[in-house]
Amino acid sequence: MNRATSVVLCLLVVVACGGCDGETGVGPTLPSTDTMTWDVKNSCTGSADLRFFDRTNGVVFPSNTQSYLLDPGDRQSYKLKCNSNANICYGASLKSNPRFYWGVAVDNSQGCQGCCHVCDGSDPTPISLTGC
């Protein structure tokens, strides 16, 4: 590769990736990721909507417009891929009465104690939705 081509490539890399180390580009540093598995059981007689909220990065699992459905007696495991050290909280509400909630509620509107876990490759304590 001649010098002129190398300089042009380096300039393109600087624009696209934010840096250049000689003839190869150095891209942005991506966050490291971990996984965590939440085990949730619905011990109520009504169905519940469930979401997980990454309060560090503003991510919602499964999404802002969808939730996981747990029918009465269901027990499900949810394996989430998350940024390392992110604070992940669960929130659930009864489908028939969204004012009855667990954790941070299905809309992430509540505070809680013990409903969050740091994404570090370990799994949170299993949860049982009770008291309804």
Image (cartoon, rainbow, N blue to C red):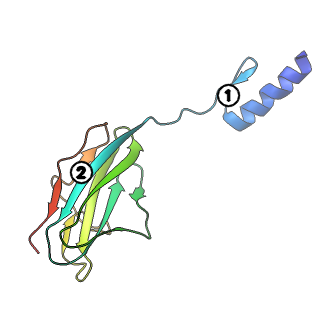
* Residue at the far left in the pictured view: 131
Query: Which residue is nearer to you in this view: 94 or 118?
Result: 94
Query: Which residue is nearer to you in this view: 78 or 6?
Result: 78
Which circle, 1 or 2, is nearer the viewer? 2
Q: Give the image location of residue 107, x and y in percent.
A: 32, 69
As displayed, is residue 81 above or below residue 74? above
Q: Give the image location of residue 70, x and y in percent.
A: 27, 69
Q: Residues within 10 Å of mark 1 (few under 14, many from 20)?
A: some
Residue occupying image coordinates x 26% and y 38%: 122
Residue 83 placement, left or right of 129: right
| Alpha carbon separation for disc pair 1 and 2 | 37 Å
Query: The N terminus is located in which quarter?
Result: top right
Query: Which residue is nearer to you in this view: 11 or 95?
Result: 95
Residue occupying image coordinates x 78% and y 25%: 10
As displayed, is residue 87 above or below residue 43? above
Query: The C terminus is located in which quarter?
Result: bottom left
The residue type indicated by label 2 comes to Cys
Residue occupying image coordinates x 59% and y 33%: 28
Residue 117 placement, left or right of 83: left
The residue type indicated by label 1 comes to Gly
What residue would you read off at disc 2? 116
What residue would you read off at disc 1? 19
Residue 20 placement, left or right of 78: right
Q: Quadrant of residue 96?
A: bottom left
